[in-house]
Amino acid sequence: MSKYQYFSLGNNSYKPWIAVTLGYKKTSRVTSPSIALLDSGADVCLCSTDIGIWLGIPFDKKSRVTLIAANKTKFQTIKETITLYACGKKYECPFYFSDSLPPVTLVILGQKGFFGH
C-alpha cells in the first residue's frame, strides 16, 4: 500500500487525509472531490448521510445497522455499496452512512472496503 502524507486541518493535529470522489451507480451521481480520513482502526468505511442523500441513495428503503465506536458509543448507520475513486483507482466499497460523524470528518476509510483492497 502507498504511504500517505499527514496534514493538519488547522487544529495542530496531523492525520492521514486523501482526496476522494464518491459515486452511486444507480443514479450516476458523482461528488466533487473532497477529503477522507484514512483510519486503520476503523473496521468499516463511513460517510455522512448528507452525502448519501445527495448521491440519491434511497435510505427510506434500507435497514438500519447499529455500530459501536471506539469509545463504546452506539450509533445508527445504513449500509450501501458505492464507488470510491481514490489514488487514481476505482473501488466498489460498502459504506455505512450516518448522521453521527464529526463535521470535519465526513468520509472515513476503514479496513473493510478501503484497506482490504
Image (cartoon, helix red, strand yellow):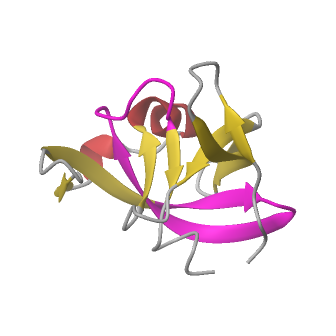
Q: Residue, x 12% and y 47% (percent of image)?
A: 74
In x, y percent, where is residue 54? 54, 31
In x, y percent, where is residue 107? 53, 43
In x, y percent, where is residue 38? 58, 55
User: Of 9 and 107, which appears nearest the observer?
Assistant: 9
Residue 47 visible in the snapshot: yes
Magenta stretch: give its range: 81-106
Look at the image and say whether residue 108 sits in the magenta stretch.
Answer: no
Q: Residue, x 72% and y 48% (percent of image)?
A: 20
User: Of 105 and 96, which appears nearest the observer?
Assistant: 105
What residue occupies the far top of the structure in this picture?
Answer: 10
Look at the image and say whether residue 94 sits in the magenta stretch.
Answer: yes
Q: Quadrant of residue 115?
A: bottom right
Vertical arrangement, residue 10 with respect to residue 24, above or below = above
Residue 28 visible in the snapshot: no
Q: Relative to 37, is 30 on the left or the right?
A: right
User: Of 1 and 112, which appears nearest the observer?
Assistant: 1
Q: Quadrant of residue 1?
A: bottom right
Q: Quadrant of residue 13?
A: top right
Vertical arrangement, residue 83 with respect to residue 28, above or below = below
Vertical arrangement, residue 95 with respect to residue 53, above or below = below
Q: Relative to 97, is 110 on the left or the right?
A: right
In x, y percent, where is residue 93? 55, 68
Classify the position of the C terminus by image quarter. bottom right
